[in-house]
Image (cartoon, grey):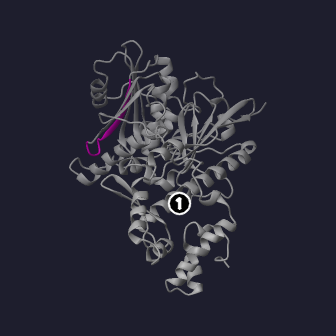
């Protein structure tokens, strides 16, 4: 066998790893993966501003590593995707620590201890580029050693990942007194906290496997599906077979704004806003890989009317190769065998979400819409909901104006009906925001004799009140529930 050994140039490899498209939050999430895989109970992320000497660290209280394991962890692609891993390992390619770190810093130091004996290794990219070799340094230097001493104080096990010479901040033009750049630096910390709350939400819940801290502040889990809210619609869960394993798909339709407090509504929008968070959420070993995406399925695109549709997909780590999970754990490509099923589930969820939003929109419009369109006016004032019969509705007005009627008695009847709306009974019988929402006249599309007779009464009342036949029909066409029915008014 004749061959050449075509080893990659270290400087070129570093440049390639640095250009994989990590953002700062996604890069830190990759480091947190390693901490969780090491059974850490606490992971602390520190951002310290010092101008061009600013640094970021991720410190955990996990099991730590031996010296041999540390060198392996610092070696690029020392473990490939086919390497056997523990059931809790969130890694895959063996390059996450290095690629994430090189994308954000020019100097990576890892210190680790299993039983009180701290070991340290450093990648200094300037050294790698100068000598053209993968020289993994044993001594990080005095300044870095002092930082590590602070970070490992009173600890006898765990791991510290330290980034120095940060991308975008390490330069002679960045001074410690630069307030604008400092604000930008700490804004990145806030973005990181929001991203970690989303990605590791399942780890931070009630049965928390670990706690995350960003600049001393505990990261609170973000649940994209609002599973604890009583008005969330849980559509049927499906288990889809794939190569001897199974993929779990759980669709949710979130409550509308009317069912949420303003604070809850803002929180539910997530880091990317309502439009950016609709779609599929792909999890691997409870770690969120992709948040809010329609997976490139044909005919599915982001639209405001589908903002309430969110669908959880849980894929086993054993078949993540089938999903094209990338190095950054930030994108997936669904297997061909499942795309039809996912498209079907997505379309049904989107339809239910659209209907829910439209129904809530109708209810909201009753308080602000045309006085002729709705029979009821629903308002919320001072945290109280009131239901009032619309006196301007043509049928109500006709009865009140009829000289044969006792107007005072009719008004008394209307007021009594308003004050005795059976809200409590309706709440017991009907769970809000679910598929059993009542529809006028049973949801029929064509008007039957009874509906036509009611519409005729409204039509005649409109004509008697001075409208032309055409105008009366136009009012009917815009009036609930005739706006969704076909009859003599729709021609």
Residue 102 in view (yes/no):
no
| Quadrant the C terminus occupies | bottom right
| Quadrant the N terminus occupies | top right
293 magenta-colored:
no
- Taking the spot 44% from the left edge, 31% from the top edge, the residue there is 205
Residue 15, x across and y down, in percent = 51, 45
160 over 132 or under it: above or below: above
Residue 265, x across and y down, in percent = 41, 50
**Would you say 411 lies left or right of 328 here?**
left
* Res 85 → quadrant: top right
For the residue carrying disc 1, how many other residues have a C-alpha within 10 Å: few (<14), some (14-19), or many (20+)?
A: few
- Taking the spot 43% from the left edge, 23% from the top edge, the residue there is 40
- Residue 60 vs residue 69, the one in the foreground: 60
**Would you say 357 lies left or right of 60 here?**
right
* Res 83 → quadrant: top right
489 over 161 or under it: above or below: below
Question: Secondary structure beneath disc 1?
Answer: helix
Residue 411 in view (yes/no):
yes
Residue 5, x across and y down, in percent = 66, 34
Q: Circle 1 is placed at which residue position?
A: 304
């Amino acid at each position: 066998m004749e061959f050449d050994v075509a080893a990659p140039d270290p400087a070129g490899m570093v440049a390639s790893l640095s250009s994989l498209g990590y953002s700062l939050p996604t890069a830190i999430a990759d480091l947190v993966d390693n901490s969780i895989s090491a059974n850490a109970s606490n992971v602390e992320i520190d951002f310290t501003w010092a101008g061009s000497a600013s640094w970021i660290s991720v410190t955990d209280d996990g099991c730590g590593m031996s010296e041999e394991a540390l060198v392996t962890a610092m070696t690029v692609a020392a473990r490939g995707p086919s390497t056997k891993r523990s059931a809790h390992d969130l890694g895959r390619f063996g390059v996450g620590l290095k690629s994430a770190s090189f994308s954000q810093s020019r100097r990576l130091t890892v210190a680790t201890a299993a039983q009180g004996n701290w070991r340290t290794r450093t990648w200094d990219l300037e050294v790698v580029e100068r000598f053209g070799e993968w020289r993994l340094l044993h001594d990080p230097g005095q300044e870095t050693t002092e930082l590590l001493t602070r970070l490992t104080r009173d600890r006898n096990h765990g791991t510290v990942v330290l980034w120095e010479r940060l991308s975008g901040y390490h330069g002679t033009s960045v001074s410690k007194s630069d307030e604008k750049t400092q604000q930008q630096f700490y804004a990145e910390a806030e973005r990181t906290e929001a991203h970690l709350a989303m990605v590791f939400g399942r780890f931070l819940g009630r049965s928390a496997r670990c706690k995350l801290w960003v600049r001393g502040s505990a990261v609170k889990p973000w649940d994209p599906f609002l599973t604890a809210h009583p008005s969330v619609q849980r559509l049927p869960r499906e288990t889809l077979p794939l190569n001897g394993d199974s993929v779990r798909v759980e669709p949710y339709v979130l409550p509308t704004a009317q069912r949420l407090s303003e604070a809850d509504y803002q929180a539910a929008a997530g880091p990317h806003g309502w439009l950016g968070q609709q779609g599929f959420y792909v999890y691997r070993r409870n770690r969120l890989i992709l948040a809010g995406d329609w997976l490139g399925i044909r005919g599915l695109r982001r639209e405001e009317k589908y903002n309430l549709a969110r669908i959880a997909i849980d894929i086993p780590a054993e078949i993540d190769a089938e999903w094209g999970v990338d190095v950054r754990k930030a994108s997936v490509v669904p297997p061909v065998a499942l795309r039809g099923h996912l498209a079907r589930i997505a379309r049904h969820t989107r339809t239910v979400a659209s209907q829910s939003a439209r129904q809530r929109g109708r209810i909201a419009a009753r308080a602000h819409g045309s006085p002729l369109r709705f029979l009821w006016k629903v308002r919320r004032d001072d945290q109280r909901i009131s239901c009032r019969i619309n006196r301007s509705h043509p049928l109500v007005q006709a009865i009140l104006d009829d000289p044969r009627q006792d107007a005072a008695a009719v008004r008394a009847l209307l007021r009594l009906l308003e004050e005795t709306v059976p809200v409590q009974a309706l709440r017991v019988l009907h769970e809000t925001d679910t598929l059993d929402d009542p529809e006028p006249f049973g949801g029929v599309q064509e008007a039957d004799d009874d509906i036509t007779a009611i519409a005729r009464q409204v039509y005649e009342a409109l004509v008697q009140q001075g409208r032309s036949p055409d105008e009366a029909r136009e009012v009917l066409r815009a009036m609930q529930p005739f706006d969704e029915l076909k009859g003599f008014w729709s021609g």
